[in-house]
Image (spheres, rainbow, N blue to C red):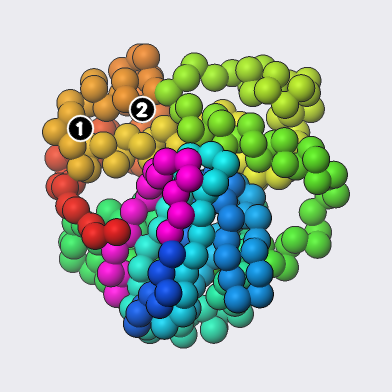
Amino acid sequence: MDILAIKSLWPERKGFDLISPNIGDMYIFIHFLTPAVLYTKSGEIAVRAGGCVFFAANQPRHFASPDCDLLHDWFHADPSFGALLTRYGITCEQVYYPENSGRITELVTELELEQVRHKKFYQSISDTFCEQLVIELARSADEESEQITIDPKTRELLINVRAEVHMQFDRDWSVEDMAGLAGLSASRFYYLYKHVFGISPLKDLCSVRIQRAKNLLMRSHCSVEEVAELSGYKNIYHFIRQFKKMTGVTPGRFKKDSFGGEYIR
């Protein structure tokens, strides 16, 4: 499988509306980190934050973000990707909600890095990441009915809070701050958040910050200190510790091993 283009944590302004009457000879994957509207042959779908969708080769693609800024992960893959979707029973234009949305962003980021670096055996590693991502979505379809019931209003409230925190990742958030946005106690918010998204609130925020740092280190000439500040860290040593804990290497080593690259949207 060849990845033709890829971006993690890609932002667009409120009102973004992408229409492609025919996407050509490829498959497209999108992971929405903020709410969006998806237009399909069967009708309009309101996609909650965390939703994932594939578009099939030679089919139209249309989605928009009318109510808020858009943050999403995406990649384009060659036609052979269709066999992987068939193997795991994934249906194109169906929205999947993985248990751990942050894991999807991690996989897309790692896949992106492999495409940029082109190190030895990158194709085999890329195929593995693609398969892991598809498996996460296939599992989500089976686990949907097993989840504890949360009323739609509360679920939407949590999704909106998560979207706001992710868009303002550089703010000094606490669980109490997040819970205040939802009008819940900190303990209740923590429990519901982890149940809905499969990750704790602060770990989720940390994941977004580290993904942001990876992108900056890979594509910009910013120093490690500047990257730390742009990623929401006030303490450079705290940033270095968290970065190494989540990636296995220091920011300096990561920057040294990476180089920039531009992709056509």
Q: Is residue 94 above or below residue 111?
A: below
Residue linked to disc 2? 231
- For the image, the number of numbered tags is 2
Tag 1: residue type? Gly
Q: Is residue 116 left or right of residue 3?
A: left
Q: Secondary structure at mark 1?
A: helix
Q: Is residue 196 left or right of residue 37?
A: right
Provide residue 179's location: percent of width, then percent of height.
70, 23
Provide residue 45's location: percent of width, then percent of height.
65, 61
Q: Earlier in the sequence, mark 2 or mark 1?
A: 2
Tag 2: residue type? Ser
Number of the front mark, 2 or 1: 2
The quadrant holding residue 51 is bottom right
The quadrant holding residue 183 is top right
Q: Is residue 131 visible?
A: no
Q: Is residue 258 magenta?
A: no
Marker disc for residue 252: 1
Residue range corresponding to the magenta coloring: 1-18
Marker disc for residue 162: none
Quadrant (top left, top right, bottom left, bottom right) of the N terminus: bottom left
